[in-house]
Amino acid sequence: MLDQDRTAVVKIGGVEYPLIFTTKATKEIAKRYGGLANLGETLMKNENFEMALDEVTWLIALLANQSILIHNLQNQEKKPLLTEEAVELLTTPMELADYKNAITEAMVNGTKRHIESEENNSEGEQAKNVKVE
């Protein structure tokens, strides 16, 4: 079961795919770009339109496949992985531009932290223990 707060959704070929930013995806991005900061620079600076499309289709396939891999891990019935070629065939360049926002949303959702602090004690001092989820 996926945590919906950690996903963004794209529709490819009439099928909705949750994009999820996992530790596995982070490792793959680090292998390809050298880190998340380099990913952002690569996507923003990419002057070659074909190369930009290649990077976005790779990221969509990577992030969409995280939800499929999670499903396959937790269920007997296996789903096939989404390929970059399928993303290319089932989308338009305009859709890919919109998917950049979904990629960013998935990455932000996957890295955000929820912080809870305890209420002030009876003397009005801030509690020292903070619980991070």
Image (cartoon, rainbow, N blue to C red):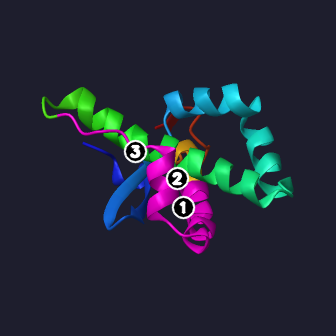
Say which element carries label 2.
Answer: helix
Query: Which of 32 and 129 lies nearest the eye of the viewer?
Result: 32
Residue at the (67%, 56%) spot, across then down: 53
Q: Amino acid at mark 1?
A: Ala
Mark 2 or mark 3: whose residue is earlier in sequence:
3
Q: Amino acid at mark 3?
A: Leu
Residue 115 is situated, as x and y percent measured from the top left of the image, at: 53, 45
Q: Are marks 3 and 1 in contact (CB under 8 Å)?
A: no
The residue at the far left in this view is 76
Query: Which of 95 and 71 lies nearest the eye of the viewer?
Result: 95
Residue at the (21%, 30%) spot, across then down: 74
Q: Classify mark 1: residues with Cα within 10 Å, few (<14), some (14-19) or many (20+).
A: many
Residue 82: give its label: 3
Residue at the (43%, 47%) spot, across then down: 64
Residue 75 is situated, as x and y percent measured from the top left of the image, at: 16, 32
Q: Are marks 2 and 3 in contact (CB under 8 Å)?
A: no
- Can residue 110 be seen by looking at this rendering? yes
Residue at the (58%, 65%) spot, across then down: 96
Q: Are marks 1 and 2 in contact (CB under 8 Å)?
A: yes
Spatial separation of the CA atoms under disc 3 and disc 1:
17 Å
Query: Which of 104 and 88 lies nearest the eye of the viewer?
Result: 88
Q: Say if the magenta span includes residue 84.
A: yes
Residue 102: give its label: 1
Mark 2 or mark 3: which is in front?
A: 3
Task: Please give left or right for residue 68 compared with residue 92 in the image.
Answer: left
Say which element carries label 1.
Answer: helix
Residue 106: give its label: 2
Spatial separation of the CA atoms under disc 2 and disc 3:
17 Å
Q: Which residues are magenta?
A: 78-106
Spatial separation of the CA atoms under disc 1 and disc 2:
6 Å
- Magenta stretch, main secondary structure, is helix
